Image: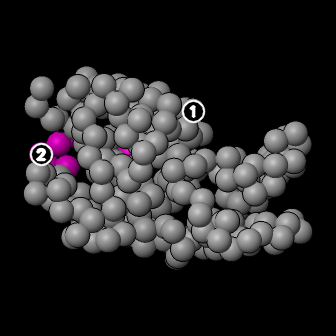
Amino acid sequence: MAIKAIIFDIDGVLADSREAVVHNTKELMHEYGYATLDRKVEGMSSAHSAESVLTALAPELEHDQEKMKEMLARLSEITAENMGLVKPTLLVEKLPALSKKYLLAAATNRKRSAHMVLEKFGVEKYFGAVLTSADCPPKPHPEMLLKAAEKICVKPSGCMFVGDNREDEQAAVAAGMRFMLVDGAKGEEGCRAFLKEFC
């Protein structure tokens, strides 16, 4: 089936957020008195939900849901305060032209901050749907992708999901969508296959 819709992950695809994720996580853990190893924080992929990152850094949070909830709320505040650290990738400038040829959606393991990122880049208007881990289980669960396809009225087989990691690929396969791997932070080099096929 011909591709009618492109669903984008945000981090690593549309947004180079590695610096922001590391900075925000370290700031949060420091505020709550946790000693964190830089390399451990830096090794956490943007593919992971905030809950799984915090649990990996402070396993006791798994049994203290009240504290987890409080820390997640504070992390949302820190993320909003440091939105300037999130940089657009090359693909962001391609969205206006792509929106004339394809239906676009976003599916991300971010929560509310997903909308902040798209608003900051001035591109939220190009997306027919934006699904986050506040709406559905995080990837690699396929529900987020299936709901995005449903919202833009395209069958999964007519969608291409563009992601930057194994969890994204697993979600696409489980949802019955085509998948393309990109590394938006590497510019043209990391997006070459996508640019060749769609731009």
The image shows residue 59 at horizontal and vertical percentages of: 81, 49
The image shows residue 29 at horizontal and vertical percentages of: 79, 66
Whether residue 104 is visible to the viewer of this picture, yes or no, is no
Magenta residues (range):
99-106
**Viewer-side residue, 100 vs 28:** 28
- According to the image, what is the colour scheme of the structure? one colour
| Quadrant where the image shows the N terminus | top left
Location of residue 113 with respect to 172 vertically, above or below: below
Location of residue 105 with respect to 153 vertically, above or below: below
Q: Which residue is rendered at x = 67% and y = 47% of the image?
A: 52
Whether residue 131 is visible to the viewer of this picture, yes or no, is yes
Location of residue 52 with respect to 32 vertically, above or below: above
User: In the image, which is nearer the foreground, mark 2 or mark 1?
Assistant: 1
- Kind of residue indicated by mark 2: Lys
Q: Is residue 138 left or right of residue 192?
A: right
Distance from Cα at disc 2 to Cα at disc 1: 30 Å
Q: Which residue is rendered at x = 66% and y = 66% of the image?
A: 41
Identify the residue under disc 1: 137
Q: Which residue is rendered at x = 60% and y = 47% of the image?
A: 49
Q: Which residue is rendered at x = 23% and y = 25% of the image?
A: 157
Q: Secondary structure at mark 1?
A: loop
- Kind of residue indicated by mark 1: Pro
The image shows residue 80 at horizontal and vertical percentages of: 61, 66
**Neighbourhood count class around disc 1 (C-alpha, 10 Å): few under 14, some 14–19, many 20 upward:** some
Give the quadrant of residue 172: top left
Q: Is residue 149 left or right of residue 110?
A: left
Asked if the magenta segment contains residue 120, the reply would be: no
Give the quadrant of residue 129: top left
Identify the residue under disc 2: 101
| Quadrant where the image shows the C terminus | bottom left
Asked if the magenta segment contains residue 102, the reply would be: yes
Mark 2 vs 1, N-terminal side:
2
